[in-house]
Each structure stands twice: as C-alpha cells, then as structure tokens.
C-alpha cells in the first residue's frame, strides 16, 4: 500500500486551509470568497486520494460565510446547499458545527438577513443540525 502524501502537499486541503483562515479572520470578505471558491473548485477536481467529504463541506460553508459577510444571501444558499443535502450518516460533528457557523452568521449580520431567503436558510440549517451527532451511524 503506497504511503499517502503529507497533508500540506495536497492541493485541495491547502486551498481549504487558506480559505478557512481567511474567512474566519474576517478582515476581507471578498478575499475570503475568492479563496473559498478556489477551495471548492479544488475539491471538485481532486483525485480520490485528495478528496475528503468533510473538508469539501468545510470549504462550502466557508464560501457561504464569506458570501453572508458580503450580503449575498442567495450566493450563500447556493454555496451551502450541497452540505445540507448530505445524508445523515455524513453529518459528523465538524460538518454540523460548520453549518451552525453559517446559521450564527445569518443571525449576527442583522437586518439585511431577515428576508425570506435568510429565514428559509436558517430553518433548513436548524433541521439539518437537529439530529445529534452522538446518534449518527458511524
């Protein structure tokens, strides 16, 4: 069995970690969005050895967070929808935590996130995270 490459050499993971740091620092939402778009694209073209559903979901939620910070709710919905479509058995703690960060960002951004699209996304995330990870199939 071949030894996998160190994680820092994997293109998709590197793109995701850069995006994660940029989005969570919160200093430049436009840069966070472009870094997150690059990470999502890297996972779409990743080899089987480079791909991880959890990291891809993290990149998608980072993209949603960046778009919320820019006031782009419809874009955030588009970014996070693949995560919300994951089957229950893939809703691990990391993924549900990432989805909850999107929910929190929607509430924190105030008035501009009170429209029907934002409310609908909050409700969808609440339903997604309603199953405790402790009862999920491993």
Image (cartoon, rainbow, N blue to C red):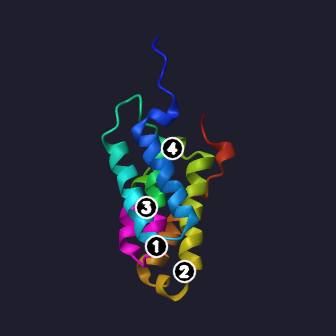
The residue labelled by disc 1 is 68
Q: CA distance from mark 4 to mark 1?
A: 21 Å
Mark toward the start of the polypeptide (1 vs 2): 1
State the mark number for residue 63: 3
Residue located 52% across and 88% down the image: 111
State the mark number for residue 54: 4
The residue labelled by disc 2 is 109
Q: Position of residue 136 (x, y in %)?
A: 62, 42
- Taking the view exactly as shown, the residue that stands out farthest to the top is 1
Residue located 49% across and 17% down the image: 3
Foreground residue, 83 or 41? 41
- Crowdedness near tag 3: few (<14), some (14–19) or many (≥20) residues, C-alpha within 10 Å: many
In terms of image quadrants, where is residue 107? bottom right
Mark toward the start of the polypeptide (4 vs 2): 4
Cβ atoms at labels 2 and 3 below 8 Å apart: no
- Taking the view exactly as shown, the residue that stands out farthest to the bottom is 111
Task: Tell me the magenta residue range.
Answer: 64-80
């Amino acid at each position: 069995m071949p030894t996998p490459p160190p994680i820092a050499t994997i293109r998709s993971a590197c793109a995701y970690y850069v995006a994660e740091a940029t989005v969570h620092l919160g200093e430049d939402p436009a840069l966070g969005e472009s870094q997150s778009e690059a990470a999502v694209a890297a996972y779409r073209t990743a080899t089987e050895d480079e791909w991880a559903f959890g990291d891809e979901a993290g990149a998608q939620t980072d993209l949603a967070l960046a778009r919320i910070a820019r006031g782009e709710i419809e874009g955030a919905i588009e970014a996070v929808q693949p995560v919300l479509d994951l089957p229950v058995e893939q809703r691990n703690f990391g993924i549900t935590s990432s989805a909850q960060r999107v929910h929190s960002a929607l509430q924190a951004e105030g008035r501009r996130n009170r429209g029907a699209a934002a409310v609908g996304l909050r409700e969808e995330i609440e339903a997604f995270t309603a199953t405790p990870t402790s009862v999920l199939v491993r």
